[in-house]
């Protein structure tokens, strides 16, 4: 007898709500977790309106005015991972260009990648000639399908006005994302230069493997980082995780809304994680 799994979907930040709604419809229609994450992520990346959240078309450019994107996808099944980093024109970057063209992908002019919002922000950046702080939105999506496949994806245009070629945590397995079909999956959002030093997504999944709930695992990983660097020095980080029972968890160093759906819910719910100090 085939054991049917609890279907579920989760996404980082409030702006993931339409993506999680679409994922819930696709999961209910019987689609598998990888198709769901890949399709919904591609739609999100192509939407210039969501670019202001630092994802894909309409994302913030680097300091030379060029939009460079990082993205990755990982299945819970062992060894199934793919990523792109510092890609220009959504699918094309140095070295990847010939490969992408062989597969039938086309290049986008950088002007098509900038939205009015991000082109204006870039002009202001050039005028002020100073680095910007904050703003590391990044979308992370996790889907669990009826057959018990779990897949996680992340996508970002990276730190606004970054140095050309800068790669953050998102496309690095264990840092921006991790999945293990025996346990669950996790994704990170925030300051990628710092996040990548702690492999937090891998750590969350390992703690779930040792019996922690998604929420306990996310909070334990954040507390470990806070203990190591000092509570007051903690950088921007948000973690989400989903286990194979369709249970969700999150932890963050800033106020962190995320969106969640599982079969027991009529609609997608927005949950808000409030940062917790170690000293409280
Ligand atoms: N978390 C996305 C980045 O820093 O690139």
Image (cartoon, rainbow, N blue to C red):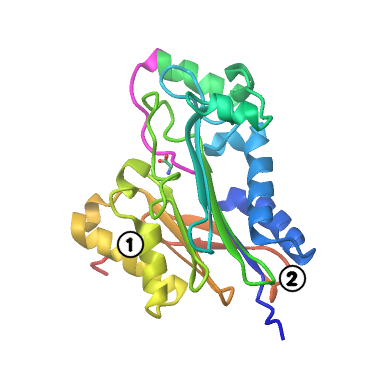
Residue furthest to the top = 127
Residue at left offset 33%, top offset 69% = 220
Residues in magenta? Answer: 127-138
Name the image quarter holding the C terminus.
bottom left
User: How much space separates mark 1 and mark 2, taking CA atoms?
Assistant: 31 Å
Residue assigned mark 1: 222
Q: Is residue 67 left or right of residue 131?
A: right
Q: From the viewer's perspective, is residue 175 above or below residue 220?
A: above
Residue at left offset 63%, top offset 22% = 108
Residue 216 visible in the displayed image: no
Q: From the viewer's perspective, is residue 33 above or below residue 195?
A: below
Specify whether tag 1 is near ligand 1 (CB below 8 Å).
no
In percent of width and height, residue 176 lies at 43, 50
What is the quadrant of residue 55 in the picture? top right
Q: Say which element carries label 2.
A: loop
Mark 2, other Cα within 10 Å: few <14 / some 14–19 / many ≥20: few
Q: Say which element carries label 1.
A: helix
Task: Label the magenta part by its dominant secondary structure.
Answer: loop
187 inside magenta stretch: no
Residue at left offset 30%, top offset 45% = 194
Residue 221 visible in the displayed image: yes
Name the quadrant where ligand 1 sits. top left
Residue assigned mark 2: 266
Q: From the viewer's perspective, is residue 45 above or below residue 237?
A: above
Mark 1, other Cα within 10 Å: few <14 / some 14–19 / many ≥20: many
Along the line of sight, the residue nearer the viewer: 25 or 182: 182
Name the image quarter holding the N terminus.
bottom right
Q: Is residue 222 left or right of residue 156?
A: left
In percent of width and height, residue 161 lies at 42, 25
In percent of width and height, residue 36 lies at 68, 55
């Amino acid at each position: 007898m085939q054991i049917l799994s609890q279907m579920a979907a989760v996404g980082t930040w409030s702006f993931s709500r339409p993506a999680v709604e679409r994922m819930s419809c696709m999961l209910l229609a019987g689609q598998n977790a990888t198709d769901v994450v890949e399709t919904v992520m591609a739609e999100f990346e192509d939407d210039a309106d969501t670019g202001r959240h630092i994802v894909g078309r309409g994302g913030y450019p680097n300091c030379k005015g060029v939009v460079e994107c990082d993205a990755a996808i990982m299945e819970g099944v062992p060894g199934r991972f793919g990523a792109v980093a510092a890609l220009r024109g959504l699918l094309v970057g140095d070295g990847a260009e010939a490969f992408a063209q062989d597969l039938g992908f086309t290049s986008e002019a950088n002007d098509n990648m900038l939205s009015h919002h991000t082109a204006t922000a870039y002009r202001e950046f050039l005028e002020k000639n100073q680095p910007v702080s904050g703003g590391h939105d990044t979308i992370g999506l996790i889907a669990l399908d009826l057959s018990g496949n779990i897949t996680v994806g992340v996508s970002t245009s990276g730190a606004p006005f970054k140095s050309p070629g800068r790669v953050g945590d998102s496309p690095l397995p264990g840092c921006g994302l991790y999945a293990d079909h025996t346990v669950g999956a996790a994704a990170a959002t925030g300051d990628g230069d710092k996040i990548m030093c702690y492999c937090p997504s891998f750590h969350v999944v390992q703690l779930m493997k040792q019996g922690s709930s998604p929420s306990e695992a996310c909070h334990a990983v954040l507390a470990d980082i806070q203990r190591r660097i000092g509570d007051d020095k903690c950088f921007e980080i948000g973690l989400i995780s989903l286990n194979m029972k369709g249970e969700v968890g999150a932890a963050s160093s800033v106020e962190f809304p995320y969106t969640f759906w599982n079969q027991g819910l009529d609609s997608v719910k927005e949950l808000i994680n409030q940062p917790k100090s170690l000293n409280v």
